[in-house]
Image (cartoon, helix red, strand yellow):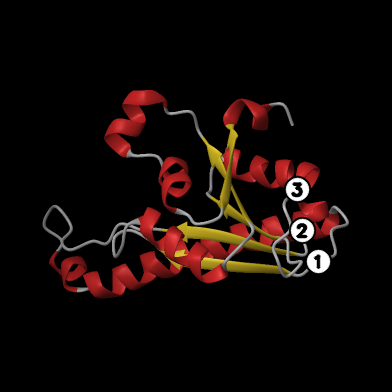
């Protein structure tokens, strides 16, 4: 990892809940974490709010705000759990640098790509590591690729770790 002007080698790892996301941490431990002076683990979580429930359940529809709060809290809890699991994995590997975690809300309120980019810009890392699931041309065209978006819009270097590199770990 290239050192910044002030000697800071800040590694930011974007995580998702997939198996590739978990293996990305293993990849970073093996190849990147030892040269970092600071590590940030970033996850953009999302949930699907309910406005009305199909069918005839009036008492449930009436409590959709309560249900949405529970859905959001559950998504936030899963994000926190993922970040803590990944942080513990790095610590158990013997890495002793400061490790920070950040969970940010993505969809439905904001584009997941944009909240990741905003958080990356605030953190100002030397290097961003993210995974690629290998969706192919059509998947990227219709769904858009988070890693492709970050490569083109982040001000620092972005390392995209291909899924086949992760499978070999």
Residue at the location (40% across, 46% down)?
149
Residue 127 on image: x %, y %: 63, 54
Whole-number angstrom distance, CA of label 1 to CA of label 2: 7 Å
Residue at the location (62% across, 67% down)?
101
Secondary structure of the residue carrying tag 3 is loop
Residue 39 on image: x %, y %: 70, 62
Question: Which residue in the structure is indicated by mark 3?
Answer: 32
Secondary structure of the residue carrying tag 1 is loop
Mark 1 or 2, which is nearer the eye?
Answer: 2
- In the picture provided, is 69 more to the left or to the right than 96? left
Mark 1–mark 2 contact, CB under 8 Å? yes
- In the picture provided, is 89 more to the left or to the right than 77? right
- Which disc, if any, is residue 97? 1
Residue 140 on image: x %, y %: 35, 33
Whole-number angstrom distance, CA of label 2 to CA of label 3: 7 Å
Question: Which residue in the structure is indicated by mark 2?
Answer: 36
């Amino acid at each position: 990892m290239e050192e910044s002007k002030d000697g800071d080698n800040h590694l930011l790892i974007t995580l998702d809940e997939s198996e590739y996301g978990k293996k990305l941490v293993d990849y970073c431990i093996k190849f990147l974490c030892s040269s970092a002076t600071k590590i940030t683990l970033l996850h953009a979580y999302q949930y699907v709010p309910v406005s009305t429930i199909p069918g005839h359940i009036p008492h449930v529809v009436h409590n959709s705000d309560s249900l949405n709060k529970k859905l959001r809290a559950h998504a936030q809890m899963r994000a926190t759990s993922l970040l803590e699991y990944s942080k513990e994995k790095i610590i158990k590997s013997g890495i002793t640098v400061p490790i920070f975690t950040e969970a940010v809300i993505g969809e439905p309120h904001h584009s997941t790509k944009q909240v990741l980019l905003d958080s990356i810009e605030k953190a100002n890392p030397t290097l961003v590591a993210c995974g690629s699931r290998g969706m192919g041309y059509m998947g990227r065209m219709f769904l858009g690729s988070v890693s492709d978006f970050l490569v083109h819009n982040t001000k620092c270097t972005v390392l995209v770790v291909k899924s086949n590199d992760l499978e070999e770990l």
